[in-house]
Amino acid sequence: MMREDVNVGRQFNNARREAMQFHPPFSAIVIGAGIVGASTAYFLAKRGVAVQLIDASAPASEATGAADGAVSVASKRPGPMMAAALSGVRLYATLAKEGVFAGAFKHRSTFIVAASDEECAVLEAHSAALATVGVRVDTLSAANLHQRFPVLSLKARLGVEVHDDGHAIGYQIVHRLLTAAQITVDRNTKVDGLAIAKGGRSVTGVSTRRGTIEADAVVIAAGTGSAEFLNAAGVLTPRKGQLLVTERAPRLNAAMPGAIMSGRYLLSKGTQKMANSTPARGLGLVIDPLVTGQFLIGGTREEFGDRQSNDIDAVSRILAEAVALVPGLASLRLLRSFSGLRTAVVDGLPLVGRMPGFDNAYIATGFEGDGICLGPVTGKSIVQLICGEAPEVDLTPFDPSRFERSGEKL
Amino acid sequence: MIDPEVIVIGGGPAGIAAAIEVAGCGYAVEVVEQRDSLGGAIHRQPIKGVAPISQASGPKARWRALSDDFASARIPVRYRSIFLGVDADGLVLFENRLACSVERLQAKAVIVATGAVEKVLPRPGWHMAKVSTAGGLQVMMKETGRAPKGRVLLAGNGPLLIAVTAQMARLGNPPVAIVEAGDPLGRTGAGFSMLGHMSLVREAFGYLRTIYLRGIPWMRASQLTAIERDDTSLIAVVRRANGREQRIPVDRIGLHDGIRPNDFALPNEKATSVAGPVILRAGDCRESLGAFAAEADGRRAGRAVAEILSGGHERADLGCVKIERARRAQEVLSTLFAPVGGACPISSLPADTILCRCEGKTVGDLRSLCERADRLTGREIKHNGRFAMGLCQGRFCAANTAALMAEIWPQAPAPVAEDLTGRRWPIRPVSIAALTGARATSTEHE
Amino acid sequence: MTSRAFGWMGQCIPFRDGETVASALETAGVYTLGADALGQETRYFCGIGACQCCLVRIDGVVREACITPARSEMTVETMEVRRD
C-alpha cells in the first residue's frame, strides 16, 4: 500500500513527472461534494494540497444522499468494474481500520436469492463468474439457505452468499471524510465554468458568481451537473432510483446475517447494459439491515430522471417484493421514502481521468449505482493520477477520451 | 365507488368549513379524518355517555352551527384514515386503519387542514413517562370527561395553560400549580389592547376567575427548568420570578409552549390542477390562529378551490377580515404572554438534555456536531446527527433543533424546521402490510 | 359491564365505549407503555398521533394508543413483546 505522504508524492518518478508535466499541485479545486468529490478532496488534503471543495448546494445533497449504500461486488461481472469494486471494498475496510470510517462501514455478506427457474439459472452462472475472480462465494441449497437465513421466505429456492461485502451510508461517509480532513465546503456555490489559461491547454481555476477561484488543478465530480463542463450532451444520463427506510426492528434485523438481493436484480441490471433494450423502469430488490435496526429497501432504476419524488406504485411494488422474500417486514412501518438521480454514462462505465484537451483538469463521475462503493477508491486513484503515480485502480477503461475517439465530442 | 373531486384532510373547524363551502359550489367532496369523530383537537367529542367539557359559549355555538351545516350537506367522511401525502403521480394517499389498507384517490383538489401541534421546548426530563403536553391532557379530558389523576403541574407558556387549568378544576382535580414563563398581568399595555377582542377577554376572565376562586398558584415569570424523578413522584424544578428555585413533587406534568402549524412534510400549495391536484392549506396548519380563524380560513380555501376548478383564479381577498382580526388578537396574546426575560436559549440547557426524543439525541450531541469551521445545513444536521430522523419525523424536535442551530451560528440565515424535515411522503409512518396488502404477522418472525 | 375490557400484558383493562387505548390505560394507572427500539420508555404525550411516543402493539400491529379506539377483543402489548 502506497504511503500518502507529501514527500512521497513529490519525489515520485521524477522523469515521468517532467515528461508528462506532472506536479503534485499546491492547490486544487474539487467541484461537487458528493462521495467522489469528498473522497478526492480528502486524499488531496492528506497530501498537503490546499483543497477548495465547492458545491452548488451542500455535501451529499444529490445521488450520494439518496444511495442504497452497497459496498459490494455481489452484482458485478468480471471486468473493470469488478476490479474497481474489489479495490473499493478493500479501501473501505482499510479506512474503517484506520478510524476514518470506523463504525460507518458495516461488514456483511450479500445473499443473492433466486425464486424462479430463470433467476436460478442466472444466479448459478453469476456465482461461478464471481468465483473466477477470487470472490468468496457459497452456494446454498434451499435447505441450507433457510438454516442460514431463517427469516427468508420459503419461496427462495437458491442462494449465493457473497462474503466480504459491506454497507455504508453515503452521506455519513462524506461527513467522515470532510471532518477527518477538516475540509470546509463552499456551499451554495454554483460553478459557472472553468477558467481556461491562454493557449487553452490548462485551466487556472473556476468562475463562480463570487468571482474566479484559482487553483493549480480542477477536478469535476459534479454528477449529473458535470455535463455542462463536458460539452457532451448524451454521454451522461440521469437514472432515477427510489428507496425506502423502515422503522427499527432490532430482532428481525439481527436475524438477518446480511443483505438480500433478489436474483431479479441481476436480470434488471443485466438488461441495463444492453443498449436499446432498457426497460423504462427496472426494479431490483435489495433489503439491507442497517446498524440502527432499520431496513433500507430499494430500489428502482428509471430512465426518466425529471422527478425527485416517490410514487405509490413503485413504493408498493418494492415493498410487496420485499415482503415476499422476508415476510416479517409486513409487521413494520415504512418511515421514509426518498429518491435520487444516479449519473449514468451511456456505455455503462464511469468517466474517470484527465479531461481531454487539458493538462490539469480532471473528471470523476458517472458511477450510476456504484458511487458509494467506488467513490473513495476513485478519489484516491484520481489523486494518484494527479500526482503522477500509478493509480490504485486501473483507470484506462474509464478514460473520458474514449468518447472523443468514438466521435462523441467531449 | 367514484373518486371525489375534492378531498379535505382533517375534520376540524377548517376542514369542515372548507368541505361545506366546496359542496355548496356543487363539487363532490369527501373528508378524511384520522379519528372516529369530527371536531379536531379543539372540539374533541366526548365518548358515549359523557357530558361535553365546559367550553366558552361562543366557540360551542359556532361548532354546533358548523356541524349542523355539515350534517345537512351530507358530505361523506372517511374516518380512521391517516393522510400520507400526495405522490409523484398526484394521487392522494391515506392509510385506512379500519380496513388496514392504503387507499389512493385521484382528485382534482386537496384541501389540507391538519391543524396545529403544540410547541414543547426541551427541558431536562421532558421525555419521561407521566410528562405529556398540556394539550394532550386536555384532549383526553374532553374525550373522557375526567381530569388527569393525582398532583398535576402545568408548565410552559401561553393562554392554553389557564384554559386547561380551568377545565381540570371543573372536573374536580385542579392542577397544583401553573408555571408560566410570561407575566400577562404585568403587561398593562397589551392588556388594554385585549379590550379590542372582547370574546377573548370574556373567555380569559372565565378561566382566571376559576383559578382565583380555587386558589391555584399561577406562577408567572417562572420557568420549569428540569423534571426529575424519585421512587414515587416526578419532581418539578421551578425557577420563580425572584430567582428562587422551588422543587414541587407531582404525579403528572403537562407541558405547553404555544402552538404552531402541523405542516410537517405536507405537500406544497399548488393553485392549478395541471399535473396533479390543486393543493391548498386551510386553518391552523397554514397559520395557527385558533378555531374561529380556522373556520373562516376553511371557507376561504373551499371557495378558492371551487373558483380554481371552475376555471377562475384563486382570490387572495376571500375571508380576509376575520382572519386578519384573529391575527391581531394572536399578536396581542403573544405580547401579553411574552416570556419574561426573553425565551430561554436552548444552548444554555445541560448537554444531556434530550432534543430529539425519537432518536435519543441531545443538546450536547448537536453542539458537538456543530463544532467545525463550516456551517452545516439542516439536512446535514439531520443526516449526520439523526435529528428529525425518527418516528415523529421532526414534529417535536425539528423547530427546536433549528433554533439551537441558529443560536450556535448567529451570523447564518436562521434555519427552519423544514430544512430538517423536508417534504416527502409518507408524512406519517405507515404499515407495510397496509401498503402491500400483506397480512401483518403478530411477531417479527414468520 | 365487565365485558368491555382488553388485554394488556396479562392484565384486564376496562374501557368505556369509544375510549382510546391510551385513555383506558391511563385510567387503569398504566403510564409507561413499555420501551421503544432504543430502550426509551414510551408514554402518552401529544394525544393527536403526532409524536409517536405512545406506540403499542395491538393484535401484533404497531399503533398509536392515543388515536386507536379500544375494542374488547383486542390484545395490546408493549412494543418490545414478541411471541416468538
Image (cartoon, coloured by chain):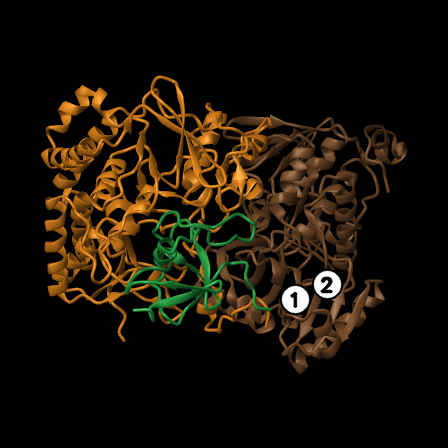
Chain colours: A brown, B orange, C green
Parent chain of label 1: A
Q: Is residue A46 above or below residue B309?
A: above
- Is residue A128 toward the left or the right of residue A299 in the image? right
Q: Position of residue B72 (x, y in %)?
A: 11, 65
Marks counted in the figure total 2
Residue at the (38%, 50%) spot, across then down: C50
Name the residue furthest bottom.
Answer: A117
Q: In this view, does A408 lie above or below B177?
A: below
Q: Are marks 2 and 1 in contact (CB under 8 Å)?
A: yes
Query: Do badges 2 and 1 share one subunit?
Result: yes
Residue A152 occupies quadrant? bottom right
Q: Position of residue B287 (x, y in %)?
A: 26, 41
Parent chain of label 2: A
What is the CA distance from the residue labelled 2 to the residue labelled 1?
9 Å
Q: Position of residue B324 (x, y in %)?
A: 16, 36
Element class at badge 1: strand
The circle drawn on residue A261 is: 1
Dot 1, how many residues are within 10 Å of its Cα: few (below 14), some (14-19), or many (20+)? many
Front position in the image: C17 or A381: C17
Name the residue tied to disc 2: A74
Q: Can residue A359 be seen in this view?
A: no
Element class at badge 2: loop
Residue at the (69%, 56%) spot, across then down: A349
Name the residue furthest top.
Answer: B242
Q: Position of residue A335 (x, y in %)?
A: 49, 56
- Is residue C8 toward the left or the right of residue A255 in the image? left
Dot 2, how many residues are within 10 Å of its Cα: few (below 14), some (14-19), or many (20+)? many
Front position in the image: B138 or A206: B138
Q: Disc 2 residue type? A: Ala
Classify the position of the N terminus of chain A by image quarter.
Answer: top right
Q: Disc 1 residue type? A: Met
